[in-house]
Image (cartoon, grey):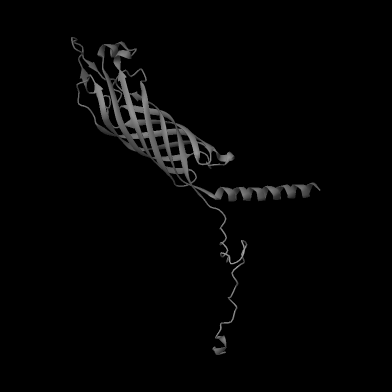
Amino acid sequence: MRKIQLVFTLTILFWANNLFAQYISLVENKGEIGVMGGASFYRGDIASDILFYKPNLGAFYKKQLNDYVGVRLNYEYISIGANDLQSNSLYDLKRGLNFTRVSHDVSVMGEFYFLKFINGNKRYNFTPYVGFGVGAWESISGTTNIDTPKTQKTILFPLNLGFKYNITGSWNLFSEVTYRFTNSDKIDYFSDVNYHIPKGASNIYQASTSGGDQYFSAKIGLSYNLLTVYGIEQKKQPKKKWLFFGKKGYDRPDRSNKRPFFGFLKRK
């Protein structure tokens, strides 16, 4: 009796698993679009012991290649800045440099899910993810009291880490942090090879010799998956009915087997 119960249970689980797999295969994730907002932080030569943050906005489009891998085009409107006068370092306080920058940030990243993610499925409704790629930074405007040559454009290398949760249907909430390594040391207008002499002072002040400038953004956002749903093949619609008499009407008669009027003239 127990053997029969075991076979019956395994059979039910087998068919349930097949039906679940068929349900998963009916939905294909073609891509994703999203908007996000948060704060951006700068790490460089000015007041290097403090994180200064400013608001930022962004949007992205992602082409999903399979269940785990996608290619993402990312844009962010970035604001960064720093001020030596707010530093806890006596050296930075005496140097007294400051700057602000507003810029465009565009990048292409590969994005990789750690878990299977399926919209509308409670079993696969969340996943952490990681991404990395290459991009470009371009300054729009800025202010500074530094009189050295400035950088307007540079290449950057973003590293992205995030978490996504499916709210309902195709809609998702996500949060992520994107760190950028840049190919320039003058995003803050002040490179390791420059020096600064404050007005009325004789001391020479240099940068922190930390290499290329870096910045990152932390944000939350809302995204929408572009899904293709494959369903059961639809049956052909029946022919329209003739409505000579009454509301119900009657079907068009089938004349496929009826002999033509001059059929008797045909040769056998």
In percent of width and height, residue 23 lies at 58, 49
| Residue 36 appears anywhere in the view | yes
Residue under the point 21% across and 22% down: 194
Q: 168 or 194, which is in the foreground?
A: 168
In percent of width and height, residue 84 lies at 29, 15
In percent of width and height, residue 181 lies at 34, 31
Residue under the point 29% across and 26% down: 101
Q: 83 or 258, which is in the foreground?
A: 258
| Residue 190 appears anywhere in the view | no
Q: Is residue 6 above or below residue 220?
A: below
**Which quadrant of the rendered structure holds the C terminus?**
bottom right
Q: In this view, does 144 lie above or below 127?
A: above
Classify residue 36 by image quadrant.
Answer: top left
Q: Residue furthest front?
A: 245
In percent of width and height, residue 214 lies at 33, 27
Q: Is residue 18 above or below residue 143?
A: below
Residue under the point 34% across and 35% down: 157
Is 210 on the left or on the right of 203, as rendered?
A: right
Q: Is residue 1 above or below residue 35?
A: below
Numbered disc total: 0
